[in-house]
Amino acid sequence: MADTVTPITQYLEALDIKNVPFGKEMRKKFLFDEEWAPLNHGSFGTYPAVVRSAFLEYQLASERRPDQFVRYDFPRHLDISRAALASYLNAPVETIVFVPNATTGINTVLRSLRFVPGDKILYFNFIYEACRKTINYVEETTPLEGINIPIDLPATEDDIVNALRKAIIEHGGGVFAKDQERKDGESRVRVALFDTIVSMPGVRLPFEKLVNLCKDLGVLSLVDGAHGVGHVPIDLGQLDPDFFVSNCHKWLYVPRGCAVFHVPLRNQHLITSSPTSHGFIPDVGTPFTPSSSDLTKSQWVSMFEFVGTVDSSPYLCVPSGLAFRKSIGEDKIFSYLKSSANRGATIIAESLGTDILDNAEGTLTDCALVNVRLPIGVDDAGRHISALEAEKGGDVFLVAQKQAFGVTEYLKITMVEEFNTFIAVLVYRGNWYARVSGQIYLEDEDFEFGAKVLKELIQRIKTGAAVY
């Protein structure tokens, strides 16, 4: 059966990407509008034109010969993608499947596990909001209880690890702790959910240490790596989490939506696909009917292969994204991501006369997301000074609590409508912050522009010229 998809190597050979310098020259290899300043890679990611060529090839192939592609070609290409990503992440291929995004992966785990009275799930207070709401839903529909662990950033790695350890101990220890018999209804921690890199504020967590702590104390580790793969080096063979999900469309240069979902063999019996589809094996009744003709695949892998008729072409573009990265060099990409974010944040902080959210170890900024404090804060219940600003000992322009949401929305929408750009902003511990994203298509001039935009908008807020 002939395959009609053109290999990515043909496009890359024509591109000669390895000789393109980072910054604006590299940006020409992406798909941005010429008037758009792409300062917010972290939210949705993007991919180069060469990957789009492969993306369109798969979409066209599915329309030229629908039955051949969906039934036979797609599973073959999907396996190629799984194998490529398994090699990249140092994980057995039988532990790798795809889901549309990290939120789907988190939902898949939490809706699959069977909770009993006394079960707890621990998470930090800077959890991604969609994950927090997923926990809320599971609390409403099962005996699970969510426990929020408060952490004030900037915190050290030891602060973060010790906070999780303390919470596990306070809530009865881990469900799977050795030599500890559990009585019915007794409080125990079944799962700990934490990030590789937090979304807002964008900081790197000591996720490797947190996984090891969970192993030691008998708790299942659920790693939300939404900003992990392609952003920082990830070695799943060494990390060995109980569950790991990471978007590929954010930092790996793959089209949306595409996320890798890794479950080691020891835990696959706990997980079913979401939505439930042809690969599911019920406890009683209908026997397993594979969705593909490959009978060598495990039931778990088959569950995720076909979950309904949707365009899963982004999954097939993983080898293309990896080939693009390989032509440049992984180390070069990781180094520039981090350096550009930190350099850009420094440029903006110096322009605004503020500072960067980091700890003394510098580990929070060991990634491509860095947070710059803005010189505006929330006047919370008459305190007249924000928590972090009090620590810094400086001045800040205060905004009434009731206006805080409006100010945030004003900043965001005005950046888009007037300045053709976007920088993620949030209020954290009483201060507004701008989350700076590094990327291979950015250079200092881009961050200088970002600084000018923020400075102008802040001045409008201070003088009352902003409408919100």
Image (cartoon, rainbow, N blue to C red):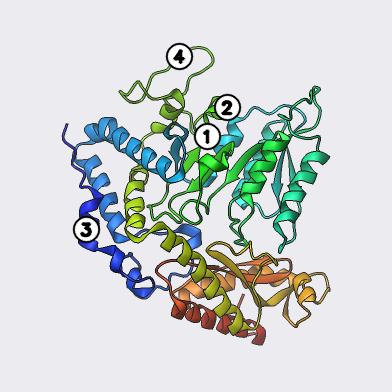
Q: Which residue is mark 4?
A: 286
How many other residues sit within 10 Å of disc 2, few (<14), some (14-19) or many (≥20)? few
Query: Which residue occupies the foreground of this view, 417 or 248?
Result: 248
Of helix, strand and loop, which one carries label 4?
Answer: loop
The extreme top residue here reads 285
Circle nearer the N terminus (1, 2)? 1
Residue at horizontal 55%, vertical 64%? 369
Quadrant of the drawing holding the C terminus: bottom right
Q: Residue, x 83% and y 73% (percent of image)?
A: 383
Looking at the image, which residue is at 21% across and 58% down? 13
Q: Amino acid at mark 3?
A: Glu
Q: Are marks 1 and 2 in contact (CB under 8 Å)?
A: yes
Q: Give the residue at mark 1.
A: 263
Q: Secondary structure at mark 2?
A: helix
Q: Position of residue 237 (x, y in %)?
A: 51, 40
**Which disc, if any, is residue 13?**
3
Task: Measure how far apart labels 4 and 1 are at the Cα level.
Answer: 25 Å
Q: Nearer the viewer, mark 4 or mark 1?
A: 1
Q: Are marks 3 and 1 in contact (CB under 8 Å)?
A: no
Identify the mark nearer the N-term, 2 or 3. 3
Residue hosting label 2: 270
Callout 2–callout 4 Cβ contact below 8 Å? no
- Give the amino acid at mark 4: Thr
Structural crowding at the residue carrying mark 3, measured as other residues with C-alpha within 10 Å and reported as few (<14), some (14–19) or many (≥20): few
Position of residue 163 relative to residue 289, above or below, is below
* Distance in Å between CA atoms under marks 2 and 3: 44 Å
